[in-house]
């Protein structure tokens, strides 16, 4: 669960928008998996609207973790 949350945080920051109230909430960012298990980003609601307004075409995310640490990098393509 923590790895997905960290991925959501990375995606949120890559969008370059303000927090909920003016931009997007974490509940509107979904981290799923494609058929090979690679992480994919799906934006909903306010996050999708904020990304569209900012000119974001797509967001890619990479995640990794060990027993004690997790890391995620997200790149928004404009």
Image (cartoon, rainbow, N blue to C red):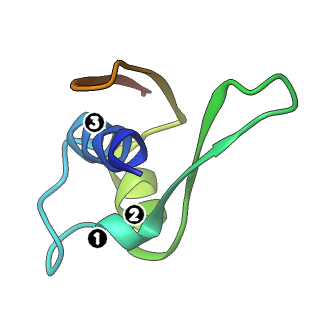
Dot 2 and dot 1 residues touching (CB under 8 Å): yes
Is 7 situated above or below 29?
A: above
Using the image, tell me which numbered label, if any, was put on residue 47.
2
x then y, percent, for residue 55: 41, 42
Q: Is residue 8 above or below residue 58?
A: below
Q: Give the residue drawn at x 54%, y 36%.
A: 57
Q: Nearer the viewer, mark 2 or mark 3?
A: 3
Relative side of 25 to 41, left or right = left
Is residue 10 or residue 69 the one in the foreground?
69
Circle count: 3
Query: Looking at the rendering, which quadrant does residue 65 occupy?
Result: top left
Please indicate whether residue 47 sits to the left or right of residue 34 in the image: left
Q: Residue at x 14, y 81 (%)?
A: 21
Q: Earlier in the sequence, mark 2 or mark 3?
A: 3
Answer with mark 2 or mark 1, whichever residue precedes in sequence: 1
Dot 2 surroundings within 10 Å: few (below 14), some, or many (20 or more)?
Answer: many
* Residue under label 1: 25
Q: Quadrant of the C terminus?
A: top left
Where residue 28 appears, as percent x and y from the top left, is 44, 69
Spatial separation of the CA atoms under disc 2 and disc 3: 13 Å
Locate residue 35, reporting x and y percent.
87, 31
Q: How dense is the environment of label 1, judged by Cα within 10 Å: few (below 14), some, or many (20 and up)? A: some
Task: Provide the secondary structure element on which disc 3 rests.
Answer: helix
Question: Quick one: label 1 or label 3, which is nearer the N terminus?
Answer: 3
């Amino acid at each position: 669960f923590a790895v997905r949350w960290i991925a959501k945080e990375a995606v949120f920051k890559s969008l370059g928008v303000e927090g909920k109230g003016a931009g997007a909430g974490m509940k509107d960012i979904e981290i799923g998996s494609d058929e090979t298990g690679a992480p994919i980003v799906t934006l909903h609601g306010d996050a999708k609207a904020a990304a569209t307004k900012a000119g974001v075409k797509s967001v890619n995310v990479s995640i990794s973790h060990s027993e004690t640490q997790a890391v995620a990098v997200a790149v928004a393509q404009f």
